[in-house]
Image (cartoon, helix red, strand yellow):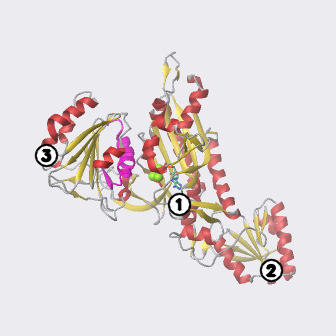
Amino acid sequence: MLLRTSTALLRTLREDPADAEVPSHRLLVRAGYIRRAAPGGYTWLPLGKLVLDRVTEIVRREMTAIGDQEVHFPALLPAEPYRTSGRWAEYGDDIFTLADRKGAEHLLAPTHEEMATLLVKDLFSSYRDFPVTLFQIQTKFRDEARPRAGLLRGREFLMKDAYSFDLDEAGLQASYDRHRAAYQRVFDRLRLDYTTVRAMSGAMGGSASEEFLAATPVGEDTFVGCTTCDYAANTEAVTTRAPAATDPDARPFSEVHDTPETPTIASLVELANTRRLAGRDDWAATDTLKNVVLTVRRPGAETAELLVVGLPGDREVDLKRIGATLHPAAVAVFDDWDAHPELVRGYLGPQLLGKLGVRYLVDPRVVPGTAWLTGANEPGRHATNVVCGRDFTPDGTIEAAEVRPGDPCPACADGKLTMRRGIEVGHIFQLGRRFTDAFALDVLGAQGKPVRPTMGCYGIGVSRAVAAIAEQHHDERGLVWPAAVAPCDVHLIAAGKGPQLDAALDLGGRLADAGLRVLVDDRVNVSAGVKFTDAELIGIPRAVVVGRRLADGYVELRDRATDERVELPLDGLTERLL
Ligand code: ATP
Ligand code: MG
Ligand code: MG
Ligand code: MG
């Protein structure tokens, strides 16, 4: 491949774009990789598209290598399946919805669990067909509250999403482990400095979940690692040891813990009605769909509290009704969630409280199997970055006890936690049967009885990964691409016109014939100095300068990362660069 600067759709900028807050955004725009086209939407210019394609191909190969099969779902989908799964309401404002000419509701898919489940249900009917994993690499749409930082948080972005279907837990675990290992190979090949951390499950529900966080100060996630053991967790998912309860009244709603053996909606409403929440008045109980929602405002208190009691498997919550009564603080207590602690933390935190605009915290310390989501609308606090270790005191105020570096490790005796920021480039989940339940996906089991498959889902932010690489691979002069994802292998620079230009074009042709990707700077109206500056900004790993020494049959090879420069004879250069 030979790309000529003189004709390429490539314009470098001297100035930083006004809206660019982070290095990757600044540099990708300045070096001519991307252009902003819409809020949270970017056009990939030729150089950018080359990088994106290389990253995509690495991801595709590693997925195919573990036996995943590539499919491609539509991005424009009818609302129905997302209503069936409950995610139409859960995603709420985060999805783009539209109506077709007949008025039928549609959405632009944020992920495709529903479609994958329906496809497998459509085609597979026997245990012999399993396990199976599908993946696609596709544009996703999310109406992010705050698109930012260029490619890092777009409203339209490229994701690799995979969905595994297994017949039992052991199978799911194996699929999960296989993807975990493949993800590590992907991020190694992308030369990302990343950490695999315990995570919350977000809108997916499910139990086990890990994120791959590329460390950088501009990351939106904060994670802790242990100095001695291999414990690492997103601060959203940190679990600390339960503190001794000094005052039993300091645990509000504890009365709800002694729910009947098999709680039903009616019994929980009854419980709340009869106990009046230990004398707190001004509360309301709402039986919405399958959840019981209780809101509480203490007499004279400035803050209102919210108690949500959910039954396992319940996911629908009438957000509007809660939203109407909920004010600055919120508590949600879930009983009977031993099997699904992540569901509580992952689903209710971001999805419910997040939607209500409540800053929330996860405090899993209370009692095993019970997670408390506590929150307060404190201006300036980013909920997802201040998580863990909050207590409600009897007077209803919330005390913060954030995780700090230096805190003892929750997993081992002697370690201490250190804290860093990172970008979520990948996320893997053990979903379980949430979607196979929703769509009643049953297949004939080996014993002749129906079996309901269990799912995993696995995402990589492909376009975000491009930006993450740029965050980790740049210096004050520009981008410094790792060879595996660079748009070109060689940046040929004709330092002068006439013979130097001819020789550069000739060499470029030969290198391209030999299979190298070449960008040749053949512009005649700019100085050599400008070309050098642009080459450093663009960040191709190796530059070859065809300059003064051409007369002696020599060119200069420059290494972008090390700045090393050597003079080499033109003879044999192709072999040397291969
Ligand atoms: P985030 O916490 O950053 O909002 P997420 O947890 O909502 O991400 P997932 O649902 O786990 O995202 O999607 C899988 C992957 O898609 C993420 O790990 C991330 O790399 C990527 N991704 C998610 N949202 C965006 C976005 N708005 N722009 C670019 N990439 C994204
Ligand atoms: Mg998100
Ligand atoms: Mg996330
Ligand atoms: Mg995620």
- Nearer the observer: mark 1 or 3; the answer is 1
- Name the side, left or right, on which 458 lies relative to 573: left
- Kindly identify which residue carries mark 1: 152
- Kindly identify which residue carries mark 2: 524
Q: Quadrant of residue 376?
A: bottom left
- Residue 142: x and y in percent read 51, 52
Question: Mark 3 or mark 2, which is nearer the start of the sequence?
Answer: 3
Q: Residue furthest top?
A: 448
Question: Closer to the camera, 507 or 574?
Answer: 507
Whether the residue carrying mark 1 lies under 8 Å from ligand 1 is answered with yes
Q: Please say if the residues under marks 2 and 1 sit with CB atoms less than 8 Å apart.
A: no
- Kindly identify which residue carries mark 3: 248
Question: Mark 3 or mark 1, which is nearer the start of the sequence?
Answer: 1
Amino acid type for the residue under numbered disc 2: Val
Marks 1/3: CA–CA distance? 45 Å
Amino acid type for the residue under numbered disc 3: Pro
Is 387 drawn above or below residue 284 in the view shown? below
- Please give the range of residues in magenta: 337-363
- Name the side, left or right, on which 130 lies relative to 173: right
